[in-house]
Image: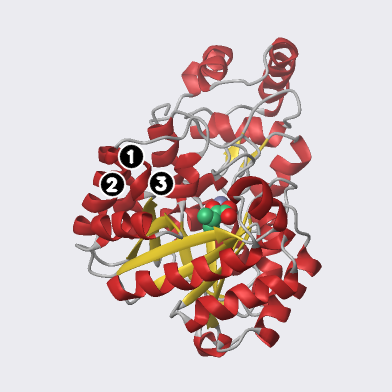
Amino acid sequence: MDPTNRTQITIFDTTLRDGEQAPGCSMGTKDKLRLARQLDQLGVDIIEAGFPIASDEEFRAVRRIAAEVQRPVIAGLSRANRQDIERAWGALDGAKRPRIHTFLATSDLHLQCKLKMTREQALAQVGDAVSYARTLCDDVEFSPEDATRSDIDYLCKVLDVAVAAGAAVLNIPDTVGYAIPEEFAGMIRTIRQRVKGIENVTISVHCHNDLGMAVANTLAALGAGARQVECTVNGIGERAGNASLEEIVMLLSVRQAQLPYQTAVRTTEIYHTSCMLAEIIGFGPQPNKAIVGRNAFAHEAGIHQHGVISNPLCYEIMTPESVGVSGNDLVLGKHSGRHALGKRLAELGYSASVPELESLYGQLMSLAENKKRIYDQDLLSMASSLSRRETARAAS
Ligand code: KIV
Ligand code: ZN
């Protein structure tokens, strides 16, 4: 497909806000600033830097990011009331490109049980909050929290009010990760058909992963006309997390022949960003996490290892280098084959004859009975009998 025909998708990163709200993911100002700089390197369009009313430290962190990270839009979250909005603006006003992101729940469940408010009161509050935010900042985003469990007629009325009050972006959150793709796409289509003035507004989506559907729902929403996606590095976020940035970006990149979209993300910065986040919060993604998990480019099964040695495309749909990983990892263990053993020995500087390789393979299998993973040190001690054949290459 001609790249000029691709639709640009805005990447709104909320690692520092929704991600940071998740248990065990809190970050101090210094770390937030460090990660914000890396998100800038990564090429995201918008950084949601925090929820300034939440605490003084949060306020200070948003303020520093706003002052020091100049290229992306810097957003700050606020509930839909004047005090929150003022606090958000106080943190954002030094930004080159500030955005106030304000939200109010629209499902009857949230209105009745959490906010103790009628639908009419909420409508009025949205109008007041968005127009007040617009007196401070040109770029205002509004989110109807719990949109996917809201009555669609009422939701459209709320969105009408937000647009009339001056919101430039309407973000549709699947707050509790309840939606399924076709249904979510249908909701976006209905919003596009019914909301007055929608043609002048960007539709955004913000999907949680409680049913493992966050990325699928995000993709379905793009098909229905959403043009901004909210996501987080490593998919961190409330409960089961948010749609994962790396999965969305690589989905659009790897399947570009089928998907007519593009993002400004530098994919080669993905792995470094993931590792930086893991280092800051003290835990990384699960080993089998798509794109950035430890096993995402690792192969242990003999047939797979042989295939990858012949041509990585046999078992890899993207190169490790395309996401900033230095190469695939042929893991030696009880499922490995002779090809991978021979290759690793060669990398370590040894060349083994066929009978020697056979003997080493037997030793490897016995060792792998008791050990989940075989390390280079294990191979080096097994290969000591080959020492006279050692080449100039040093073991890594
Ligand atoms: O999940 C959610 O509804 C949110 C909003 C504040 C956008 O995080
Ligand atoms: Zn959220």
- Judge from the rendering whether residue 156 lies leftward or rightward of residue 199; answer left or right: right
Is any atom of residue 270 visible in this view? yes
Task: Name the quadrant containing residue 295.
Answer: top right
Q: In this figure, which residue is indicated by the disc labeled 3?
A: 272
Q: In whole angstroms, how far apart are the C-alphas of marks 2 and 3?
A: 27 Å
Q: Residues within 10 Å of mark 1 (few under 14, many from 20)?
A: few
- Disc number placed over residue 55 in the picture, else none: 1
Question: Under tag 3, what secondary structure?
Answer: helix
Task: Assign the C terminus to one quadrant of the image.
Answer: top left
- Disc number placed over residue 59 in the picture, else none: 2
Task: Name the quadrant containing residue 26.
Answer: top left
Q: In whole angstroms, how far apart are the C-alphas of marks 1 and 3?
A: 29 Å
Question: Under tag 2, what secondary structure?
Answer: helix
- Indicate the position of residue 356 as horizontal and vertical percent values: 66, 21
In this view, 97 is above or below 89: below
- Ranked by sequence position, the earlier of labels 1 and 3 is 1
Badge 2 vs badge 3, beta-carbon distance below 8 Å: no
Badge 1 vs badge 2, beta-carbon distance below 8 Å: yes
Q: Residues within 10 Å of mark 2 (few under 14, many from 20)?
A: many
What amino acid type is highlighted by mark number 2?
A: Phe
Asked whether 245 or 340 is in front, the reply is 245
What amino acid type is highlighted by mark number 1?
A: Ser
- Ranked by sequence position, the earlier of labels 2 and 3 is 2
What amino acid type is highlighted by mark number 3?
A: His
- Indicate the position of residue 316 as horizontal and vertical percent values: 66, 53
- Indicate the position of residue 376 as horizontal and vertical percent values: 52, 22
Q: How many marks?
A: 3
Task: Assign the N terminus to one quadrant of the image.
Answer: bottom right
